[in-house]
Amino acid sequence: MTQYIIIKIGGSTLTDMHETIITDIKALRELNIYPIIVHGGGPFINKALQSQSIAPQFIDGLRVTDEQTLDITRQTLLADVNTAIVARFNQYNCHAIGLNGLDGQLFNITPLNFKYGYVAEPSHLNTDTLTHLCSTFIPIISSIGYNYDSNQFYNINADTLAYYIAASLKAPIYVLSNTYGVIVNDKVLSMLKTSNIDNYIASGDIYGGMIPKVREAQKAISLGCSSVVIACGSTEHIINNIYHNDFIGTVIS
């Protein structure tokens, strides 16, 4: 049976990405395991917005995306961040390819509540296209989608997209950011049950950008994602360590 691993690389990790992330991912592919990378770009988007004197806004950990913010976000993620990541991987002869929702009609989207602006969530993954690409390339997917009814691009939370792909492929997902995992009372939870997530959010122990991470983990696991790991992307050989279950982080089950 073909094995896929979804690896979500947060924008905070991209600012100081350890080279072993790339070499570990390449090693997985050489073992006939198919890594699929989904990336964010929050720090880069914030910097681009600030250069235009636009203050970033968030609701429930999701970026509020008006028309001007969307233009900057799209430019930053597609032209700057995705291109740079693909180039960096291909320096290691990884055969990486950059993608977004419009490429090959990779995924459809459903717009969220208008209070978020041009923000959507994926509603259908073209698994045939994605798995076909995996046979030759390492896909590196940017979280920009396209609504064909309105001919409009939309911003997507990168965690939401990564979890959706993991659920669609019944695959495990490694979520890499600048935190060692889900932290409660100044300690990293080695294990987190989905049944406890609501209580942690209600009590304020889980907050900010961690909320969509754990919320989407709940949903992904209920839809068939085989496992969720949240760990620090700056740790040397973090991919290899997670694969061999030798790491500091949180496993959500």
Image (cartoon, rainbow, N blue to C red):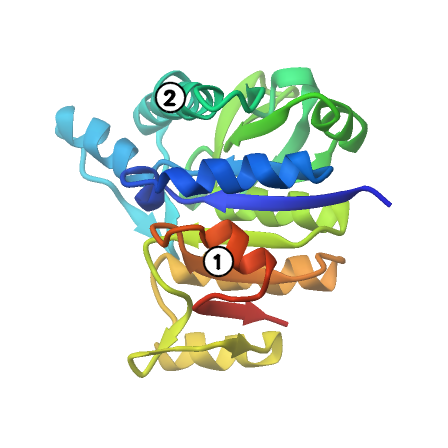
Tell me, yes or no, whether the two marked residues, 1 and 2, touch with CB atoms within 8 Å: no
Q: Is residue 37 visible to the viewer in this orientation of the structure?
A: no
For residue 57, side relative to residue 115 (left or right): left
Residue 53, percent across and down?
12, 29
Observer-nearest of 147 and 162: 162
Q: Nearer the viewer, residue 230 or 213?
A: 230
* Residue 251 on image: x %, y %: 55, 69
Question: Residue 137 in the image: x percent, y percent?
Answer: 65, 23
Dot placed on the residue nearer the N-terminal end, 1 or 2: 2
Question: Could you tell me which residue is drawn at 27 percent across and 45 percent down?
Answer: 57
> What amino acid is at disc 1?
Lys
Q: Is residue 196 above or below residue 207?
A: below
Residue labelled with disc 1: 213
**Quadrant position of residue 64:** top left
Of the residues shown, which amino acid type is indicated by label 2?
A: Ala
Image: 175 above or below 66? below
Q: Quadrant of the C terminus?
A: bottom right
Which element is circle 2 on?
helix
The residue wearing badge 2 is: 84
Q: Is residue 232 above or below residue 48?
A: below
Density class for disc 2 (Cα within 10 Å; few <14, some 14-19, many ≥20) is some
Give coordinates of residue 139: x percent, y percent.
60, 28
Q: Disc 1 to disc 2, how far (Cα)? A: 24 Å
What number of labels is visible? Answer: 2
Residue 45: quadrant of the picture: top left
